[in-house]
Image: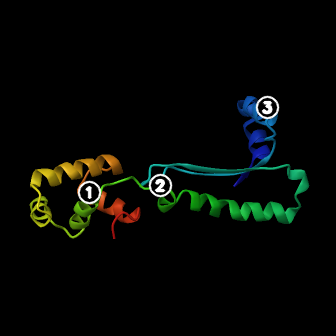
Amino acid sequence: VFRWNESFDYFGSEVEEFAQTAAKYGLKDGYAIGQTIHQITHTACITSVSMDASYLDDAQHFMIRQLLPHVNAILSRPGFLQSPSITKKEREVLQWASQAKSYWEIGTIMGITERTVKFHFNNIFRKLRVNNREQAVKKSVILGLIQ
């Protein structure tokens, strides 16, 4: 967690224009924390709080420094973000794949061709931004799409 004015002082002229523009909109001081890109959801999260720090006492500054990392962690959780929309058939294909069924077995169970199962998987890969069945199943479990 860092204080805006501390970072403005640290970076100096590199952020001067940004600081001046922010100040025009009343964003003069506050706290911020960032998180790198999440491996599963492919998102980065920056949580920032703007305030007139002169109205806060030391205990309030301490509280903000303690709470902000937790707020940022909540906002960057995979389940907090909207899950990709998958069809009922895609969900069923994933459920069977999670039980280590082959394309042929899934097709037989669902009464569809192996080619149709592969078609559903290609859609799943695109929607979940993954490259293979194992990744699709793991990401689907994490996102709560399947159990």
Compared with 147, 56 (above or below) is above
Q: Quadrant of residue 13?
A: top right
Q: Whole-Å distance between the Cαs marked 1 and 3?
A: 50 Å
> Which residue occupies the foreground of this view, 108 or 104?
108
Q: Residue 100 at x, y = what percent?
A: 19, 68
Does dot 1 land on a helix, a strand or a loop? helix
Q: Residue at x 53, y 50 (%)?
A: 36
Q: Amino acid type of disc 3?
A: Gln
Residue receiving disc 3? 20
Compared with 4, 19 (above or below) is above
Q: Quadrant of the C terminus?
A: bottom left
> Which residue occupies the foreground of this view, 10 or 94?
94
Give whichever of discs 1 and 3 has the lower sequence position: 3
Number of numbered discs overlaid on the protein picture: 3
**Could you classify mark 1 by the number of other residues whose Cα lies within 10 Å: few (under 14), some (14-19), or many (20 or more)?**
some
Q: Amino acid type of disc 1?
A: Glu
Residue receiving disc 2? 82
Asked if labels 3 and 2 touch by Cβ distance under 8 angstroms, the answer is no
